[in-house]
Amino acid sequence: MSYTYTQLKDAIQNYTDNNETSFVSNLDRFIKNAEQRIFSTVDLEFFRKNASGAMTSGNRFLATPTDYLASFSLSITSSGSKSFLLQKDMNYLVESYPDSTVTGVPKYYAHFDVSNFLIAPTPNDSYVVEIAYYHRPDSLSASKFNITVNNVVGTFALGDVITGATSGQSSSISTLVSATEFTIGIPTGTFTVSETVTGSVSGATGIVASTSADTTLTWLSENATNALLYACLVEAYTYMKGEPDLLQLYNGRFGESLGRIKDLAEARENTDAYRKGLPSQART
């Protein structure tokens, strides 16, 4: 079993028996909070990623990936061989290499700010870079589908927020597939076929002809369905200020499901039976 965004929203509303407007408008927040709770608790290989890039000669700053959280390693390729930079505190690099105009083969890196590394010494060439890091996976709430309109008046634009006249639903156009078909984020509700939608920037209008199926899955929604569902229910029932007994039940179910993921991440995923035998229990 797995959950698409639409299926998970429906499950949350069915379990809580709540379709109240403000509750539905917060479904995205419940899902994001639930995902973040799992991400911050479990160290899965799935949350690791590699990316390549290049330094700029004479520039001691290197931009971090947009989904970067923390480093595993940073390496450069020089004269056909790869070498790994040592991570240091930024103050150490500033004190050890105070003159940024002095260049050389980089040896160290440090976090400068949320978007940049500081490299030392300042690169003397445009070295190829490879970084292994923890990344921030896309949320299930960021799922997208296509919407097709007809009887278009005007021209819809990229970034337009289209709003349905009947349903009141809104979503931003992320891709213009054609003049009458767009990729948009799935709204919390549902656009109604035959309703008129209007672009916030372009002012263009069209009538909804169809929407594609929601088929997007994430690792959590496909492989940790119980943990994701019960984490969402904890968020939802906390918002509802529900009965403590039921909230405790949801928390308990979440804890049981989370234990199975931690067993995978901390006892099975990073070893094998040939070297160490089968794990008897998860590390604590």
Image: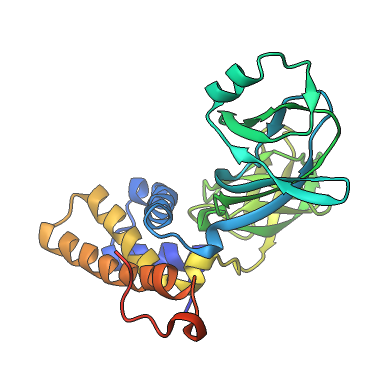
Query: x%, y% of residue 202?
Result: 74, 33
Query: x%, y% of residue 137?
Result: 55, 54
Q: How many marks?
A: 0
Examine the image and state in which quarter residue 246 appears: bottom left
- Residue at 71% across / 51% down in the picture? 51
Residue 190 appears anywhere in the view: no
Query: x%, y% of residue 118?
Result: 65, 28
Q: Pick whichever, 150 or 81, lies toward us.
A: 81
Q: Does residue 14 sit above or below 90 in this rendering?
A: below
Q: Does residue 217 sit above or below 21 in this rendering?
A: below
Quarter of the rendering occupied by the C terminus: bottom left
Query: x%, y% of residue 54?
Result: 80, 40
Residue 104 horizontal side relative to residue 135, left or right: right
Q: Which residue lies furthest to the front in this view?
A: 96
- Residue at 25% across / 70% down in the picture? 253
Q: Pick whichever, 107 or 34, lies toward us.
A: 107
Residue 60 appears anywhere in the view: yes
- Residue at 62% across / 60% down in the picture? 193
Residue 129 horizontal side relative to residue 112, left or right: right
Residue 56 horizontal side relative to residue 132, left or right: right
Q: Pick whichever, 181 or 209, lies toward us.
A: 181
Examine the image and state in which quarter residue 78 appears: top right
